[in-house]
Image: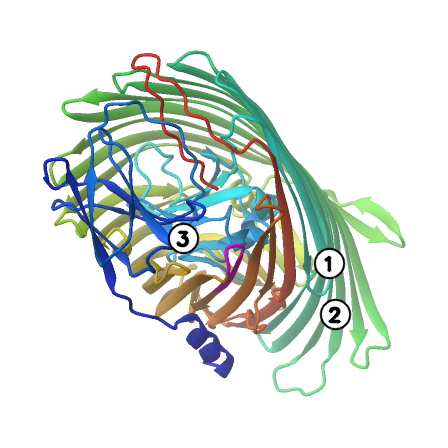
Amino acid sequence: MSFRFLLAFCFLFVFKVNAQISVKVVDSEGKQVPFAVVSLINAKDSSLIKVSLTDTLGFARFAETQSGDQLLQTQLIGFITNYSAITSDTVIVTLASSAVKLKEFSIEATRSLVEVQADKVVLNVAGTMNASSNDAFELLRKAPGVVIDNNDNIIVQGKQGIRFYVDGRQLPISGADLVAYLKSIPAAQIDAIEIITQPSARFDAAGNAGIINIKLKKDLSLGLNGNYAVGGNFGVYPKWNQSISGNYRNKRVSIFGTYNWNRGRFISNNHFYREQSDSIFDQRNINRSTNGTHTAKAGADWYVNQKNTIGILYNLSINDELNNVESLTPIKQRDAIVPLKYLSAKNISENHRQNQNFNLNWAWKDTLNRSATTDFDYGFFDNVSYNYLPNTYFSSNQETVLSENNYRMKTPLRIDIASIKTDFSLPFFKGTINTGYKVSHVITKNRFDFYNVINGVDTLNLLRSNQFDLTETIAAIYAQYIRKFKKWDLQFGLRNEYTQTIGKLTSVFPQEDGSVRRKYNNLFPTVGISFKINQKNSLGLSAGRRIDRPSYADLNPFESQLDELSYFKGNAFLQPQYSTNVQLTHTYAYMLNTSIGYSYTNNFFTEVTDTTQSNKSFLITKNVGTRNLLSINSSLPFQLTKKWSGFFTVGALQAKNKGSFGEGRDFELQRFSWNFYAQQSYLVTKHLSVEVSGFYNSPDIWGATFKNREMWGMDAGLKLQILKDKGSLNISVSDVFRSMRWRGISNFSGLYMDASGTWESHQLRFNFTYRFGNEQVKGTRNRKTGAEDEMNRVK
């Protein structure tokens, strides 16, 4: 472990132990008041510092603070809100019974960088320096328990197969298309990222690793208001982004819209060293790309009456990308010093992606706590890629051309997806029962046109061209029961999913894997039990079964080349994989969260590096066997002083992969790994704060047989509130020590591969945001009681 890492580690973890201030809450008769909300706020501007609940004896506790600077705000339904000064280490608060209606108020709250909740971990973005990041994909590198490997695979707690949602709606894409879409969502437009590792029966069963839900900003202010943001990131090349959003809201209707634009140039370097048969291939490549994205969202909600709301939503994303990969591969015999020849190759690709989604939704809720929601969704992804791959072989002195093989490819892709779902919720047997259904229908059309380029003329090669069409229909129903006892919370559910998949490969010559036709039905039970031991300690136990279905890209058997000797290939025979997950969680003082989990995956599929002929290697996804994962994770948000707060999480994983690539090619690989992530924020002045964050991932397993080296990095930045707090300026440096480099080694079945690479991880970034319009959230009148609801304005 390097000196730079130890220096960064020491810088992140300088802790200070403080005394506590105790708050005792009683009523007018002197009786203790349990479960009152006690907020520590700044006396000058009422900004929120920390929130606590009183225990069964009426006590709440905070870290020591300077008297006079802060106030205690105590609230509970049925009592008048109390404001008390901090005059000693123990403050007694007396709440008076409420005999008057509550008045509206506004609170400016400071958000925690990371929140640990009972069923999920939340990475807050809006209002933190996380908003100065490039996009959603980059933010995921900061998320606790999330690892992104060298192939842009997103791994959560050691497991691939995460499913992505945006504002609660699932994205039907994967692979490079998913990465491109996540990169098209600017960080400035994201409110928070939720990581749900044990989804309930209400969610689709797909996703071995669980669900990541990206929540976009939605302004609740009445009247007309909006937000403008501009930013830049400077590495080897500059990258720019702008966004504007607006919202108009009254008591009957809300109309909102956003537009985002970003454009930049990027560069990465890769090294692939390969020993195969009696030859060595030592490829080095450099990838330069230009990327431009436009995204827009528009929608409206109509509050028909107190029970009914109707909404419409439209999303648009347009992405244009130009890649230029240049590689040089010396080819030599194992014992030779001088190469026999060199392969000089390029992959010039032009990609155009467009995604549009339409949603119509209805929500109903009555005063008896019964509710129903229905969503109609239709969307499509329209992508087309053009690739030109010239391959030139040179003699050992790199002066004489031995041969040329030049190709051109065109790959249009169209995905249409339509779905309808309805969810019901109603009181039942002293608890709540949730039930519903969902039907989705996806049509994928993927054409692969392969051209030989001879003397500058493109000739369609019918033997290597094909059309692959895939239709998938999933019908699901579920039921879930939730009940709360004195110290127990119980939820159990059952989801049934019927899947029908039809895939057809059309080519000149029929292929063995040219047709895919499957029908299967599965039950997915989920159970969750929590027990409150006392006011500070609680336990939770959850278990569930999940499925990962192959994506359209994994099933399509056509080849996608990096150069003439390296390519990717789909697998039409790929089967779904099933996982059983169990997790035990302990929570202390609503803050320290520790979990132990076990996951068993049957029919485990992953990317495998294989060989063909004597000089070619390819990457293919295969069902290889089983995977066992044993994990432990611990997370703690903390508030050391009124100005110093932070969060850290640490996790360990024992992984074991066992299976076979074919007859005589059995494997077994196991490895222990651990990871660490921390963020700290310090308020220098009322308007200036600084933040430092860092992570460390130990060596681990990638795919079936690759052993990865360690990776770590640290970011630092500052945030300045300006223009009467309507403007915010974030300036930060990512990967301060230039340490984010990836490397993996595999040695299996006659193929040794050492792969490594870097990208523009070290960048100087700035982001300026300006809010305009009305920022107050008004109280709404309850027509039955005439009382006004108190609503907090949280930024």
Residue depicted at x 60% and y 69%: 757
Q: Mark 2: which secondary structure?
A: strand
Q: Position of residue 510 (x, y in %)?
A: 60, 39
Crowd around label 1: few <14 · some 14–19 · many ≥20 (10 Å): some
Q: Is residue 296 magenta?
A: no
Disc sitting over residue 732 in the figure: none
Pointer 3 or 1: first along the chain:
3
Tell me whether the residue at label 2 lies in contact with that at label 3, contact meaning CB atoms closer than 8 angstroms: no
Q: Is residue 146 above or below residue 771?
A: below
Left or right: 32, with 290 as reference point: left
Name the residue beneath numbered marker 1.
Answer: 238
Residue depicted at x 62% and y 77%: 280
* Total numbered badges shown on the rendered structure: 3
**Boundaries of the magenta span:** 685-692
Marks 2 and 3, how far apart in space? 48 Å
Q: Is residue 633 visible?
A: yes
Marks 2 and 1, how far apart in space? 32 Å
Q: Three-letter amino acid code at disc 1?
A: Pro
**Rendered image coloring scheme:** rainbow
Name the residue beneath numbered marker 3.
Answer: 114
Name the residue beneath numbered marker 2.
Answer: 343
Magenta segment, principal secondary structure? strand
Front position among marks 3 and 1:
3
